[in-house]
Every structure is written in structure tokens, then in C-alpha cells.
Image: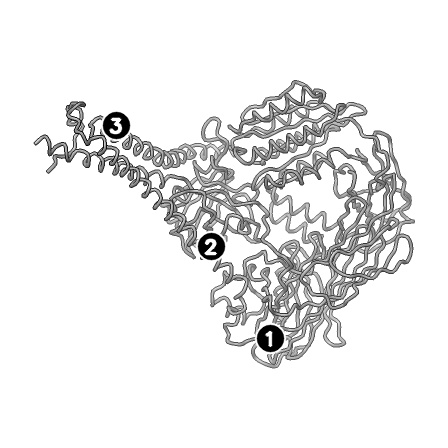
Amino acid sequence: MHSPLTGGRIKTQSPNDQIVKDGLRGLLASIAVGFTVSTVLVLIVITLTLLSTAASAASVDQINNTKSGSLLVKNAQTGHYMPTPTLLTDVKINVSGILARTTVSQQFQNNSKDWVEGIYVFPLPENAAVDQLRMRIGDRIIEGQIKEREEAKKQFQEAARSGKKATLIEQERSNVFTTSLTNIAPGESITIEIAYQNTLDYRDGAVSLRFPLVVAPRYIPGQEHNENTMTSTVNQGPSVTDAQKISPLIIDESEKKRNPVNLSIKLDAGFAIQTIHSTNHAIKKNKINEHQYKVNLVSNNVPADRDFEVTWRSAPDAMPRSAVYTEQKGDKYYSLITLFPPTDPNADIPRLPRDIVFVVDTSGSMHGASLDQAKSALKLAVQRLTNEDRFNIIQFNSTTQALYSHEQPASEKNLKVACRYINALVADGGTEFAPALSIALNDDAKAGRIRQVVFITDGSVGNEDEIFSMIKKRLGKNRLFPIGIGTAPNSHLMTKIAEYGRGSFTYIGDISEVATKMGDFFNRLENPVVTDISTKWPEDLIVDLSPSIIPDLYQGEPLVIVAATDRAFTGAVQIGGLFAGQQWRETVNLEKQSKEQGIGQIWARRKISEHMGSLRDGMSKEVVRQAVLDLALEHSLVTKYSSLVAVDVTPTRTMQFMYRQLIPLNMPNRWSQAKIFGALPQTATASSMHLILAALFSTLALVFFFKGRRPKTGSQR
Amino acid sequence: MSVRIRHLLFATLMSLAIWHLFEGGYIHAKAWLAQQLIHNAWHGAISNASAQTPWPGADTYPVARLTAQNGKIDLFVLAGTSGRTLAFGPGHMTGTALPGSYGNVVLSGHRDTHFSFLKNLSIGDQLFLESSSGDRKLYEVIKTEVVHENDTHIARDSGDDRLTLITCFPFDALVPGGPMRYAVMARAVIPRTLNI
């Protein structure tokens, strides 16, 4: 009928051939049809996309449901249903200042008729250091020993195979520990006792102690196991893979809440206590003196679905104070120095005027939400400046550009200029951080003033070594305050910059967090109470301080310094610094301070985390492992490389089989999915959509062409 | 119907078609071309032992080379996972373990360009990652999972030595920006024989 469409043919046709009467109507009709067809097609495309997204959401839901509810079923592959042993938890806490030593005792009862093996996962505070393990079977007590991790595991497995009772504590994440129990006789109960210590949170004159009583279901239940590994773990004992260990089973909500808890605290605050308050549980308080109390849970059958939290507040004090606790361990001497900022809200502490340089990353990676967050953070910061303060803004991408050549007074006029400058920031180009930092560090704090460098970046910065060495060389009295922006800022880099820069690191993951996170940030920025802190020790003493670079003391936050000295000594340590621009000094006679247990362990723990951090800086794994292991073995600490193992010497198992059993933990109250990083990156382009639309439009064009041509060729004939 | 209007309509629809064809093709062209340019920067990085930008003004640099499916897949991984970076190649998620180091190395890429091969990966498949500092590691796929974009547990440090590849899900969705992600987890293995 038609010859193939050719370009030549279109060109040769005269544009004003007969316009038939109904031509206009026909045209309108075809446009209408064309648009309708294309709209419908586009709608179909969109609908299909939505449908496929919905379908995948449904399958994700199913996966999630399987994760939380059905691991029990999967575990029952052996065909045996195992009742859960009863669990009893007894907690005793000794508080000295902001140091707490906790002893947790747990009782397991095998209610079944079989010999069983269980893994119980339990939560500890973030910075907890476990150092003691004791197992009680009837009258006998077996002490645990710190062993290199693999060795401990081997010993434990051997015990399991030869039918002995054994328990093993390994570190999975920094705040989740697991206890494995093997060869529990039918009806028998075993008590496991562990001790750990940690430093407590202090905020605005209040210290809070938190004892987490549930593990949030943060981890994948053991989805990674196929049937083979499951059967083999049943035979082999505790060698389950990592994912299963850290995934406690979540018991059904309808089931009765288990994990009853007894809890008592011996409290020595180190300062005069004004109030004691518990958030979630009823407590009983017994006053011993101004500084000391005894605190107990009123009911000793507490469900383990919410954390225990108790807070004590200090009486108002207008001066910074220090509390020192010491421990002598072998030939080493450990001191815990805590500096408390003034707690009197009415105390009139003069505020020094500040010179602030804001350095903002406007490289391409900041494009979009990150730059928006940076802008709002920056505007908040600029608005808080007072008349006496001076400021400057530097932006960097491939090049560095400063608003002023030097810091300018925060006058109303200058602030307006600054706001305009901030609004006009555009993200593009590379991330050349070093030149910007160099310009910011060109100056030092003048007498009677504070100089601070705040920089806002997503941290995709290279040349880390160059940056660190520049900070070390040129910091002077400047203080660095990195603010991390975006989904995954390089926290390690920023934390280290803050450490070397004697400032602090603030992370803003989402634009909705800007206001709250910046609140804490401003507190530090605006309220340094004691700066340039140093300690002076009796001569000839080798002192190893942690942290080695002492940061400033801010309003509302205590500062904890742990020192290790090579030998016992007599005399005093001097703690000094600048308090509101004036010299401030306290001399503490170490012999008179109260002796405490576990300070050496706190010191070792800090050193271990420094070593672990150096892995990130490319330190050899073997060197780090050895250093950590040495510290762990000396101070009895459970680390990534060391475990506590306790083995009973008497073989007791008489039956051939043993069944693995996971002890379920309660779902936390009002638990909701934690958004730690924010979100995973966007990983799709519109490419297929464009290509499909291209095909769609070209088809429409052709359809149109032929559709319109048909009556005309007819009329020509 | 008026011929002029018909021509006009035809031209409009055709130009729309061509524009979309260009937009769709451009993404693929950019994805391909960038990888060629990065190839050069990579050899610079290997020989100079320092980060090299693949083209002037680039906001990123190659940090690793990912090979899979017997060399059929050969990709240069860039630092960072911003939209701009991912147009050029798969990106290393900042804050996760660096390629070559111990920990959870997280890479993400576009499901319709560089990482479209993820849908073909199955458990037991081998992945090979070479870092710019020359560390080479062989990984074996242990698991694939569909997660919500806010479910970031897969990007956390899992305590073991692993590689996590993330892309958008479903693979054939037409409109970008969906909330689902497809993740491939692989665990480092000691190579018996390297056949990549």
C-alpha cells in the first residue's frame, strides 16, 4: 500500500495542499488520540514500576518476618523441640566517681530431659571491659582465665567433646558478648558470673548509669547457615559462625517476659550528691554520707525489656573540681584523674571573645542534601556569634576561597554578607582540603581570645597523613572542630582530627538532626571552661597518659585522664590550665586518694582501642594483634584477640547427644529500626526509562505519520 | 489533516525520541568512557603510590579494581558514593573498611550500568579485589539479600573480612530512586587457585 517512508518524499510535498473542511477537526482528534495514547503508555510504565517496587517491598517484609520469628524453627532441624532454660540475672555495681565496676551473675536451668548446649548473648555498655569469669556448679567454683582467642576456643571445644562443662566469653562487637554453655545435664542449673567495668556518662553535673537489659535485634539472624553447617555445629560444639552468635532470637510478644533481674549499686560519686533518680524502674535509696549511697531495685523480678537507668546529680559548685582514684598493680601505678566542670548554673564564668574560622567543603561530593545540611549548620553557627567575636568563612573544592583575608568583627553588616555568601555556596570540583586547613591555621589565638577552626565536610578527603602532620605542627593554641555531614562521613579521620586538634567531632547524619546536634556542638564551642590542660608529675617518673593529647574541659562534660607510671611513687601531681583566661591549678596528693580496683584495666582498654584504631591507619595486623594481646593478657581483658575460658575438670556427660539451644531474649520496649548511617547510596539511573521513552516517542511519531498520511494518499488517487 | 502540522508533530515526537535516546545512551557512554579514563589513572596510582584523579577537576580517584566472572567484569572502583561518582564507576562507601584492609569493604554501583552483573552472581561465585596499594584479595559470595535503603546494617563492620556490593533493586525498574537495595555479601577466602 505505502512505499516506505523517505525523507525525500516529505520534503517534496508542498506544505499547502488542500485543507479539507474537516481537517482541523481531524487534526485535533489525532492530537487528542496521540496525547491520550502517550499519556496512557507513560501511566502504564509508571504503574509497572510502582508495582514492581511494591512486589519487592512485600518480599522484603517476608524476609524480615522470617528473620525475627522463625529461627527457632530452623534450629529445630534435628526434630527435637527444646524448652527454654530459666534464666536469672543478678547485678551488683560499684561506682567510684564516673568509674563503675559491675558484677553480673546469671543462672541457667536446663528444664528439658536432654543434655543441652546453649549460647546466651548479653548486652554490655559500649565501653565495658570484661575481666572476670566464674562458673559455679553446685559447690564448686571454677575461675576463668584469659587466653588468646583461638586457644580459648580450642580448649573450650575439647572440653565440650570430652563431655566436660565449659563456658567461653568472646567479643563479637564492642557491646555484645556471648556466653556458650555446653553439657548442661537434664534439670541442672549452672551460674555464670562475669565482671566488667566502664566509665559512666556525665552531663551538666549529672552522672548516669545505664544497664542494658536487652539486645536490640540489630543483626541478621543466622540466615547464612545452610543445613549442613547447622548439623555440623550440633556435632562440633560451639563453632557457630559469627552471624548466628550475635543474633539473639527474639521471643514472641505473646510469650511471658523472661529474664528477671536483681540489681544493687554501691555508689561513691566523688562529689556531694543532691538527687538520685531512676528512669524506668522503682528504686530504694540508702544514704551513707554526702558522697555515698546504696541503691536497690524495689522489685527483684524485673522484665528485661527495658534498660535500667539511674542518674545522680551534684550539688552546685562554682569552680572546676578534680577527683583522683588510684590503683597499684604489680610494679605499675595507675591513676584516674577526673576533672568536673563547675556545676553552679548561677556561677558567673567570664566568656572569652572568640575568633572563628568556618571552613566548608564545597566539593562535588557535597552536592545536594549534604551541602544543604552544611549551609543550615553554618547559618546557625554564624547567627550565634556576638559583637565581640570575629569570624571568617573559607570554602574549598579544587581551589580555596575565603570570604575575608582576615577574621572580621561579627557586626550586623558583616553577618548579612556572610549569610549571602553561605546561600551562594555551590558544590563542584575536587576536595583539596590541605590548602584550606593551611590558611585556617595561618594565625594563632591572641591573648585573652580564643581561636577556633570549625570545618564542615563529608570527609571524602585524601592525604590523611599530610593533614595530621600539618595539625601537629601548626595547631598552636587553635582548636579544631570537625563537623561530619552526609550518609557516611569518614568518622575515623574526623575523630582523629578532633583529637589532634584538641577539639571535638560532631556528626550530622540527616538534615533533621542539624538543630539538635548543633546544640551540643555550640556548647563545646562556646563554653571551654579550662583550656591548655597539662599534668605535672614527680620527677624521673615515666608517665604514659591516655589520652596523650589532653583536650579542653567543656561546660557540662567531665574530662577523664588515665595515667600509668612505671613505678610506685610518693608525692603529688599538679593539674593545671587556663580557667576563664586565668591560671588554674590543683595539686593532688596521690597517697591520700582512695584506692580502687580496675583503673589499670581502664587504661589498658584505652590503649587497646588506640591500637585497634591504628589498624585503620594501615598499621600491620600482626603488630597490632600482638600489642593488644599483650595488654589483654596482662590486664585480663576480653578483646577481639583474647577470650576468657573456664573449664571444669570432671567429665559429667553420660548421654551421646547434645542439642544446641538458643536462649531467647525479650524484644525491647518500643524498639524501632535504628537509622545509624541514614541511608544506603542511590544506585540507579534513569537510563532505561529514557531508552523506553525514546522507543515510545519514535513509535508514536511513526504511527502519527502513517495515520495522517492515509486519507491524503487516498484523496490524491 | 494539515501536512505542516503533521510534520511539526512528527518532528516534535521524533526530537523527543532522539532526546531520550541521547539521555539514555549518554549515561551508558559516560559510564563506559569514564572507566577507560580511570584505567590510566589507575596505572598512575599503582606506579606513584598516591591518589590520582582520572581527569582534571575530578572529585574522586580510583581506590580499587574489581574483577568477577572470570574477568568478564573488570571495574575500577572510585572513592565515595555520591551520585556524581557513581555515574563514572562503582564507588567505595566512605567510612567502611578500605579496599585491601580487614573489615567490611562496601562498594555500590548503578544497577543498570556497572553493577548490573550483580543479578547474575550466586553463592559461591568468586570476586577479586585489588586495592590501589597492591593488596589483592579473593572473596566468595556467601549471601544475597534485598534490603531497604534505611537498613544500613549491611554496611556496618561485621567483624569479619568481607566485601559487600550494593545496587538498586529491582534491577528492571524504569524510574530511579526506589527505596530497595540488592546486596551481595562475600567473605574473604584464602585462594587455592586463582582463576580470574
Q: CA distance from mark 1 to mark 3?
A: 78 Å
Q: Which residue is mark 2?
A: B145
Amino acid on which the number 3 mark rests in the picture:
Leu
Count neighbours of disc 3 (C-alpha within 10 A) and say few if under 14, some if 14 to 19, many if 20 or more. Answer: few
Q: CA distance from mark 2 to mark 3?
A: 50 Å
| Res. A38 visible in picture | yes
Can marks 1 and 3 be said to lie on one chain?
A: no
Discs 2/3, front: 3
| Res. B117 visible in picture | no
Residue at figure coordinates x 48%, y 40% from the top left: B91
Amino acid on which the number 1 mark rests in the picture:
Pro
Q: Which residue is mark 1?
A: A83
Who is closer to the viewer here, A130 or A112?
A: A112
Residue at figure coordinates x 54%, y 43% from the top left: B98
Quadrant of the image occupied by residue A511: top right
Residue at figure coordinates x 24%, y 28% from the top left: B5
